[in-house]
Image: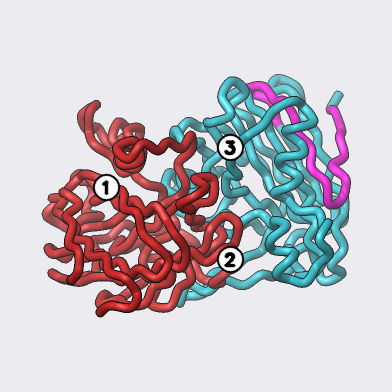
Chain colours: A cyan, B red
C-alpha cells in the first residue's frame, strides 16, 4: 500500500524517508514545479548539492539515472523513473521574498525558500542557510551563449518522477508559488503536488 | 598606490574590501583557477550566490558586466574588466577532500573548500556551510545535451579580472590546488594568484 500525501499549491512539506524508499513526485495538473531539497537524517549540514550533482554527473540537467549527491559527495537519491521529457533544472535559485519584491508581488507572497524553512520548522528542524534547490518539472533551456530561458513545464497532467533514497533523509518538497512568470505553466496558477512513498521491497 | 597581495598556489586568503573598492585577480601563469567567495562584512549568512547570480543575469556564465549578487539578491560585486575570453564558470563545485579521495589523491591534499574555511579561520570567522564558488578563469563549456567538459583555462599569462565591490565584503580567494585534472592547465601545476585592491576613486 503506497502512502499518498499532498503538498498543497504554494506550500511546502517535509518527509522522513529511509534508505531504499521510493518517492514519487507527481504533478496532477502537469505544470507544477517541485523545488526539492534533501538533508542527511542525522546531519542537516549534509545536504543535496546541485553544484556537486552537476560535477558527479558531468551534466547540468537531472534526468533518468542521475545520481543526486550531497555536499560530501555521498549518494543521497537516484532518479529511477521519469515520465516527463526530462532535463529538470539545477541552475536557478529557489524563489524568495526578495524575488517577489523585484517582480512587484505582494510583500507576503509565499516562496519556495520560505516553504523550505517553514516545512523544517514544522518538524522541529532548522538550517541557517538555503541550499540551491533541485527544480523538478522546471523547464530552463540553456542557449549556446549561456543564456537561460524560463519556459512552462514540458510535462503533462499526471506526469511524475520517482526518486530512490540511497540513505536516510529529510526530504523537503515545495509546490512552487510562482504565479507571475509562466514557470508553473501559462495559466500562472500553482497547483498541488502528489507524493507517494513506499519501501524498496514493495511495488 | 595599489596594494599587491599574493595568494600562494594551492592556498586561500581572505580580504576585507569596502564598497567602491576594485579588486584585480590576476593569473601570472595564465592557467590558474580562482575559486572565489564573498560574504557581507556584517553578516556571514549573506553570501555570493551562484544560483541567484545565474537568475539575475539569466546566464550561466560570468563575463564583463555580470552582476554578482547575494542569496538576498543584493548586488555584491560587478565585473568591470576582463582581459580573458570570459565565460568564467559558475556550475561546478569547489574541490574538496572527498573529490581528491575519489581521484586517488593523498588524504591530506589541499582543497578549495578547505582553503575557504582556513582563510576565514585566519581572520577569526567561521561559516557552517560552503556556498557554491565563482570559478574565475575556469573553462567548463556546456554542450547542447547539458554535458559539461573540464578544459584548461583559455586565459594567457598575466590575464586578469577586475571586480568592483558594491558593498562592504569579506572576499575569499583560493588558488585551486587541483593537480590531477587539467583544470589548472595541461601542466597540472597550481600557481600563484596576484591580487590588487584599490579604492574606487584612485586608478
Query: Label 3: chain?
Result: A
* Residue B75, image x, y percentages: 52, 66
Q: Is residue A171 left or right of residue B187?
A: right
Asked if B93 appears above or below B32 in the picture, the reply is above
Contact check, label 2 and label 1, Cβ < 8 Å: no
Instruction: Identify residue for label 2.
Output: B55
Q: Residues within 10 Å of mark 1 (few under 14, many from 20)?
A: many
Q: Is residue B20 among what the camera can see?
A: yes
Are the residues flagged by discs 2 and 3 from a single subunit?
no
Q: Residue at 64% across / 41% down in the picture?
A: A37
**Can see residue B96?**
no
Q: Which residue carries the number 1 mark?
A: B13
> Start and end of the magenta stretch?
A3-22
Question: In the drawing, what numbered circle is on residue A78?
Answer: 3
Quarter of the rendering containing residue B112: top left
Callout 2 environment at 10 Å: few (<14), some (14 to 19), or many (20+)? many
Disc 2 and disc 1: Cα gap in Å?
A: 28 Å
In the picture, the quarter occupied by the N terminus of chain B is bottom left
Is B13 in front, or is B159? Answer: B13
* Chain designation of label 2: B
How many numbered dots are placed on residues in this image? 3
> Are labels 3 and 1 on one chain?
no
Residue A18 is inside the magenta segment: yes
Residue A38 picture quarter: top right
2 vs 1, front mark: 1
| SS for callout 3 | strand
In this view, A49 is above or below A154: above
Q: Mark number for residue A75?
A: none
Identify the residue at image location x=37%, y=46%: B94
The kind of secondary structure element at disc 2 is helix
Relative image position of residue A55 (x, y in whole percent): 42, 48
Amino acid at each position: 500500500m503506497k502512502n499518498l500525501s499532498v503538498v498543497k499549491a504554494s506550500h511546502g512539506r517535509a518527509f522522513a524517508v529511509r534508505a531504499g524508499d521510493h518517492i514519487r513526485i507527481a504533478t496532477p495538473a502537469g505544470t507544477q514545479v517541485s523545488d526539492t531539497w534533501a538533508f542527511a537524517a542525522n546531519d542537516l549540514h549534509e545536504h543535496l548539492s546541485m553544484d556537486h550533482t552537476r560535477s558527479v554527473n558531468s551534466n547540468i540537467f537531472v534526468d533518468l539515472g542521475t545520481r543526486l549527491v550531497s555536499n560530501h559527495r555521498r549518494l543521497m537519491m537516484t532518479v529511477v523513473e521519469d515520465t516527463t521529457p526530462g532535463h529538470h533544472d539545477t541552475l536557478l535559485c529557489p524563489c524568495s521574498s526578495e524575488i517577489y519584491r523585484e517582480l512587484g508581488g505582494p510583500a507576503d507572497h509565499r516562496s519556495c525558500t520560505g516553504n523550505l524553512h517553514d516545512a523544517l520548522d514544522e518538524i522541529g528542524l532548522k538550517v541557517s542557510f538555503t541550499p540551491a534547490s533541485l527544480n523538478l518539472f522546471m523547464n530552463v533551456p540553456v542557449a549556446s551563449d549561456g543564456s537561460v530561458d524560463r519556459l512552462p513545464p514540458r510535462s503533462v497532467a499526471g506526469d511524475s518522477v520517482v526518486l530512490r533514497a540511497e540513505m536516510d533523509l529529510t526530504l523537503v518538497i515545495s509546490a512552487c508559488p510562482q504565479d507571475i512568470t509562466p514557470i508553473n505553466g501559462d495559466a500562472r496558477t500553482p497547483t498541488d503536488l502528489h507524493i507517494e512513498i513506499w519501501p524498496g521491497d514493495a511495488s
